[in-house]
Image (tube, rainbow, N blue to C red):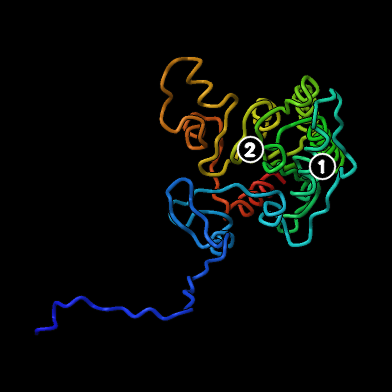
Amino acid sequence: MANLFKKTQYVKIPNRQIIEPQIPDGMWVKCEFCGEIIYKDDFNSNNRICVKCQQHFRLDASSRLELVLDTDSFEETNTNVATKNILGFQGYEKKIESLQKSTGISEGVVTGTGRINNEAVAIAVMDSRFLMGSMGAAVGEKITCLTEQATNDKMPLIIFTASGGARMQEGIISLMQMAKTSAALGKFSESGGLYISVLTDPTTGGVTASFAMLGDIILAEPGSLIGFAGPRVIKQTIKQDLPEGFQRAEFLLEHGFVDKIVERKQLKDTLYKIIMLHK
């Protein structure tokens, strides 16, 4: 007992290296909505959906196509459509070149044809990694060409939207794409074609005000931000607090702007059922 309260003496070992545990970067993902820490491989294998709160994170175009189309059925179209710096916006060309290298896509939308459970479809997927999926002349042209192809070949048309709106670097040229895409969709509708619009996070600005909301059937992913001006701009303009959940997919469904909210895992099956009902 005499030695019970004596201070413990630690002996230093010369030249001893302390090895700290090494955790590789990028192994974990923190959900920005609920704060859950998720193992990245589990997060990706769950289609980038939080395992705790089920929030749907954004998908790139390639992952989206893999999710809804039959394996190896996608054939890209309109690959020759290129962006031009019509207004001479400073640094625009370099920005486009940099994004093309980092994303592996040529513009803010990927278009083509594919199959859903062996049913042929024309499909466009906007990619928010490319200038926030903003709509310039190239994006408008690719969507218009795809719509015309779907009209001629009598295929259902599916467009996944994800955009910050019209592209400011192209000014009035970008705004013209609203009328251009809408006119093509009008002819497609007159021919009896089925157009399914799938709104993902975020769908805003000129894209919302044109082809995004012209679908015969409008679907949305859970929690997606959908609107024209952003909620902060609206709040500052009208000087009023906005309703809870304003401009989220659930709010739009409640107010009749969306036909159905579909979880990512059910998207392919839902699209197939709609296509078969229209046949």
Picture quadrant where residue 239 is located: top left
Quadrant of the frame with the N terminus: bottom left
From the viewer's side, name the closer residue of 255 and 52.
52
Residue 192 against residue 46 in the figure, above or below: above
Q: Amino acid at mark 1?
A: Glu
Residue extending farthest to the left is 1
Between the C-alphas of marks 2 and 1, the distance is: 36 Å
Q: How many marks?
A: 2
Q: Residue furthest top?
A: 238
Q: What residue is shown at x 65% (from left), y 46% (from top)?
A: 274
Q: Secondary structure at mark 1?
A: helix
Q: Determine whether, in the image, residue 110 is placed left or right of residue 222.
A: right
Residue under numbered circle 2? 217
Disc 1: CA contacts within 10 A as few (<14), some (14-19) or many (>=20): few
Q: Secondary structure at mark 2?
A: strand
Residue 132 image offset from top left, x and y in percent:
67, 37
- Nearer to us in this view, 41 or 24: 24
Measured as percent of width and height from the top left, residue 259 is found at 56, 37
Q: Residue furthest front?
A: 14
Residue positioned 53% across, 43% down in the render: 261
Q: x and y percent of residue 146 in the render?
A: 82, 39
Label 1 sits on residue: 97
N-terminal label among 2 and 1? 1
Could you tell me which residue is drawn at 13 percent across and 81 percent down? 4
Q: Is 47 above or below relative to 163? A: below
Q: Amino acid at mark 2?
A: Ile
Q: Is residue 88 above or below residue 57?
A: above
